[in-house]
Image: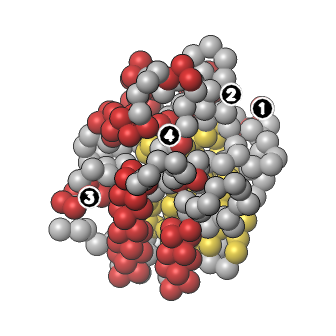
């Protein structure tokens, strides 16, 4: 049975962190992640979302997956993993002969094996895999703090992993159905419980305009249409946090379009404030390391 969102007598105020992996790295690629975890551990955060478990240039191997999981397990905050294409669908040659489907299955087993986040402060989450028809999609999860709904959506930035010459794109098509169901459930629940806001974490921006490319199929078309419709009917605010690097090396602002805001997180981490005292509900805030090191 789904627990209702609690009624709040006082204005809601809290912060969460978002860590984004660098696209290129040296050594084992973990220096940036270790620094970000140490800094988020030192800050006052409700939880931390990690957009991708590893740098794009690091191999997609079991050894790397286990090493990254160990790092995230040691974090003091609850850690929510939002998968990126570079974790399973777009991997460097040294990743071996394993298929994207095989790698995704391994990540599901390692990172989404129960109904809690990683990290020391284990946050209870509701996974899509609790629905019998979608038992194979545990990476899609939702949780709430006060009257704010949070959710992850597996939406890889490589055209949603649509493969042009693959015949029937079974992975793409099955996940497309699952994502449609998941978004409908998240918005239905948030609307029913009168949630003030929804924060959606994904690799790609699901509402970005289609890109001009050589592919004959826009892998995000259905998700874009669905989410646009759901957002138009939703009475609260929506923040879409995605992992595509911004043109600037720093995340300077949250960009609003109607009741929907977008935050593109560069390598490093950002701190997001949530406050029902402010009209826009979500805002960026300086974190503990920025006073001496500057914005990332």
SS assignment at label 3: helix
Q: Residues within 10 Å of mark 2 (few under 14, many from 20)?
A: few
Foreground disc of the pair 1, 3: 3
Spatial CA span between label 1 and label 3: 44 Å
Given contact means CB atoms under 8 Å apart, are the residues at marks 1 and 4 in contact?
no
Residue occupied by mark 3: 134
| Foreground residue among 278 and 47 | 47
Q: CA distance from mark 2 to mark 4?
A: 17 Å
CA distance separating discs 1 and 4: 34 Å
User: Is 48 above or below relative to 261?
Assistant: above
Dot 1 lies on which element? Answer: helix
Circles 1 and 3 in contact, beta carbons < 8 Å: no
Element under disc 4? loop
Q: Which mark is residue 89?
A: 4
Q: Earlier in the sequence, mark 3 or mark 4?
A: 4
Q: Residue at x 73, y 60 (%)?
A: 212
Q: How is the image coloured?
A: secondary structure
Indicate the quadrant containing the N terminus: top left, top right, bottom left or bottom right.
Answer: bottom left
Q: Earlier in the sequence, mark 2 or mark 4?
A: 2
Q: Position of residue 203 (x, y in %)?
A: 56, 50
Pick whichever of labels 1 and 4 is earlier in the sequence. 4
The residue pinned by badge 1 equals: 293
Residue 28's spot in the image, x, y percent?
57, 16
Q: Residue furthest top?
A: 27
Q: Is residue 61 above or below residue 151?
A: above
Q: Residue at x 55, y 60 (%)?
A: 219
CA neighbours of label 1 inside 10 A, class few (<14), some (14 to 19), many (20+)? few
């Amino acid at each position: 049975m789904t627990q209702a969102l609690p009624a709040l007598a006082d204005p809601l105020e809290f912060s969460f962190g978002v860590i984004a992996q660098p696209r290129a790295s040296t050594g084992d690629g973990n220096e940036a992640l270790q620094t970000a975890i140490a800094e988020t551990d030192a800050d006052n955060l409700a939880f931390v979302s990690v957009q991708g478990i590893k740098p794009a240039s690091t191999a997609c191997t079991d050894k790397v997956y286990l090493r990254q999981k160990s790092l995230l397990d040691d974090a003091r905050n609850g850690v929510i993993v939002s998968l990126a294409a570079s974790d399973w669908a777009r991997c460097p040659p040294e990743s071996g002969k394993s298929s994207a489907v095989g790698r995704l299955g391994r990540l599901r087993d390692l990172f989404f094996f129960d109904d809690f986040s990683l990290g020391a402060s284990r946050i209870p989450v509701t996974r899509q895999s609790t629905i019998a028809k979608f038992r194979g999609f545990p990476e899609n999860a939702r949780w709430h703090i006060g009257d704010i709904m949070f959710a992850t959506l597996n939406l890889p930035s490589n055209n949603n992993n649509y493969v042009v010459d693959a015949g029937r794109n079974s992975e793409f098509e099955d996940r497309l159905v699952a994502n449609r169901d998941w978004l409908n459930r998240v918005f239905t629940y948030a609307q029913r419980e009168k949630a003030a806001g929804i924060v959606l974490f994904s690799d790609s921006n699901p509402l970005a305009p289609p890109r001009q490319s050589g592919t004959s199929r826009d892998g995000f078309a259905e998700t874009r249409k669905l989410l646009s419709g759901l957002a138009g009917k939703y009475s609260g605010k929506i923040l879409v946090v995605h992992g595509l690097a911004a043109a600037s090396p720093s995340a300077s602002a949250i960009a609003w379009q109607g009741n929907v805001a977008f935050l593109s997180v560069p390598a490093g981490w950002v701190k997001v404030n949530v406050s029902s005292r402010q009209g826009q509900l979500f805002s960026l805030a300086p974190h503990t390391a920025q006073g001496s090191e500057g914005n990332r």
